[in-house]
Amino acid sequence: MDLLDKKFLLAPGPVPVPPRALLAMAKPVIHHRLPEFSAVLQKIRADLKYLFQTQEDVLFFASSGTGAMEACVANLFSPGEKVIVIRGGKFGERWGELAETYSLNPIYIDVPWGEAVKVEEVENTLKTHPDAAGLLIQAHETSTGVKHPVEEIASLTRERETLLVVDAISALGVYPLPFDELGIDAMVAGSQKSLALPPGLSFVALSARAKEKAQKTTSPRYYFDFRKELKALNKETTAFTPAVSLLYGLSEVLSRIREVGLETLFAHYRRLSGACRAGVMALGLELFAKTPCEALTIVKVPQGVDGAKLMKLMREKYKVTMAGGQAKLKGKVVRIAHLGYQNELDVILALATLEMALTELGYKVKLGAGVSVAQEYFFG
Ligand SMILES: *Cc1c(COP(=O)(O)O)cnc(C)c1O
């Protein structure tokens, strides 16, 4: 019986939102052109620089993360320009689709799903295409759970004219991606992943050369126009009506991140993902990603188990929402997020749910085997 209707959200976006952010978002809406709101914006801008580890401006839009991805493509490149696209999952494909939509000339590096792109392959492609105006990549490819070697790739692009555009929608604040230090040119984030907010805000940090480039490109754009936002920034406002309530929530979350500190946050996600992987393997299950990221753990649905049934059982009986596979991974994997307002017990919950649901579907696992290994990991 559905007595308590207690629900658990363990999907890689949207994620649970902490009460202090929920309460902040319930505050009365004020007019966004008032000095009072400019003060909120100034605080948020300073805190975003801390989070992105940059002295440069971080712009934000009222959209899901994809809006900021589109903004990068529309603002940083002109039709016909060559861009190298790392395509190793659903979100890499999205970069390609955006590049094609804006009539860029994408050069694809296709990577088998579950693997990270090889740095040598990127280097060779950059050498073959010295005229590439950009390189588009995911930090975490959330559809496969892979972490791409952004740091190494940044060391290649910062010595070239090629702008490095990183989709860090599920990676920002999860592991170190120091924007200035690495010389990244554009980095995209979204509110409903690592920032533990509802969906609806997207972010882009821009390097000096990316800002310059945005002034010269000829692709059409209107709402997602970096030039307009950069101009508004100087007047301590935004070009259009900002998502006032979400920004109140953001302000809370960013204050919390500053209190905790980035290093502690990174260690937290390392710990959760490490324990989850250890627990999954203790159950005799396989991880999908060969170089797994810290934001989520992707488990292969074992032979003989119906993936759709497994997800449905966890969702309907145990009220635990994890995510299934996307596109060609549909029915084949379970994606467990370690994002947002989550701690050690969320990992235990995920493993316990998986153990019970698999057992119920007739797949033999030792109940508690994954849970106990994760517990030991936390003590270790
Ligand atoms: C979730 C996600 C996206 C898509 O973001 P939306 O907010 O759904 O538009 C893009 N890239 C990555 C890596 C993601 O995890």
Image (tube, rainbow, N blue to C red):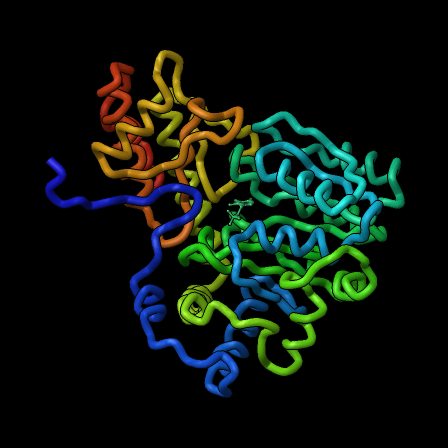
Residue drawn at the location 69% of the way across and 76% of the way down: 231
Q: Would you place residue 128 above or below residue 5 in this image?
A: above
Judged left or right of residue 353, residue 255 is: right
On the question of residue 311 being in view, the answer is yes
| Residue 123 position by quadrant | top right
Residue beneath the point at 32% across and 25% down: 310
232 sits left or right of 130 in the view: left
Residue at (35% x, 31% y) in the render: 279
**Left/right of residue 70 with respect to residue 251 in the rendered view:** right
Quadrant the N terminus occupies: top left
Quadrant of residue 110 in the image? top right
Quadrant location of the C terminus in the rendered image: top left
x and y percentages locating residue 220 in the rendered image: 74, 57
Q: Position of residue 297 (x, y in %)?
A: 44, 35
Furthest residue toward bottom: 35
Q: State the residue in front, 316 or 58.
A: 316
**Percent from the top left, x then y, of residue 2?**
13, 39
Question: Where's residue 121, x and y in %?
Answer: 77, 32
Given residues 223 and 367, the one toward you in this image is 223
